[in-house]
Image: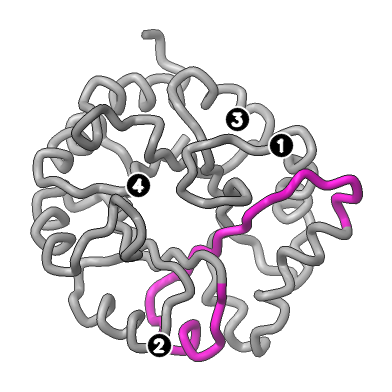
Amino acid sequence: MRIKICGITRPEEAEYLNENRVDYAGFVFYGPSKRNVSIETAERIAALLLPDIKKVAVTVSPSADDIRRIQEAGFADILQIHKELRKESVKEATLPVWYALNLPAARKPSDALTQILQPIEALPDELHERITGLLADAPQFGSGKTFDWKGSAEMFRAVAESPPDGIKRLLILAGGLNSENVPEGISTFRPDIVDVSSGVEGNFGKDRNMIAAFAKAARGETR
């Protein structure tokens, strides 16, 4: 199971990720978030990470200029987009894009799936392949709360088994994960990657011991 630790804000947190050999580090570029960092800060922290840890730039309704600035900085390997998926932004992207789906509780999973994938379907066909990952998140991203796993897992698996545009994508599970519930999340959704932020935070940012516990639980290792 691949692991993403999101919302990295301090240089010492790079050491925690290195110690646990996680796969992805997420840097948030969204002013209202308490985890927001500047591109310069992200560059400094990213330089401390092991080379095989991929860096994810997390954005919210980014403009084409936002995408351009992040890519020109050169530290990121992946772009993660929440909310609005603008055609001009995806067109500007030269890095792989993960698109976040805010999954509601759904009485009709097929109807909800059509609705939440509409932003991808609305893109020109030639841009579809730039979306390489789909991230299942709570209705309010960054809340640190889980969502209706039972009602949403069917939608999430449907994307994996029969993507509407025929393009297979990585499936990332986020939204309120922690070391206690991540095994259940994995067995319910069968994702490629699990993504945690609040679930490994203490009073002053990411916590070394909580990251270690999460990594062990996600990998099914004995505590």
The residues tagged by marks 1 and 2 sit, at their Cα atoms, a distance apart of 33 Å
Q: Nearer the viewer, mark 3 or mark 1?
A: 1
Q: Is the Cβ of the residue at disc 4 closer than 8 Å to that at disc 1?
A: no
Q: Which residue is mark 4?
A: 6
Three-letter amino acid code of the residue under disc 1: Asp
Q: Position of residue 168 (x, y in %)?
A: 65, 62
Q: Secondary structure at mark 3?
A: helix
Sequence order check, earlier mark of 3 and 1: 1
Instruction: Tell whether position 42 is magenta.
Output: no
Q: Quadrant of residue 128?
A: bottom right
| Residue found 29% across the figure and 51% down from its top | 35
Q: Residues within 10 Å of mark 1 (few under 14, many from 20)?
A: few
**Which residue, given by chain and number where applicable, does mark 1 sit on?**
148
- The answer to whether mark 2 and mark 3 are in CB contact below 8 A is no
Q: Which residue is mark 3?
A: 185
Answer with the quarter of the image where residue 99 lies: bottom right
Residue position marked by numbered label 2 in the rendering: 64
Instruction: Pick the residue in front: 97 or 29.
Output: 29
37 lies left or right of 154: left
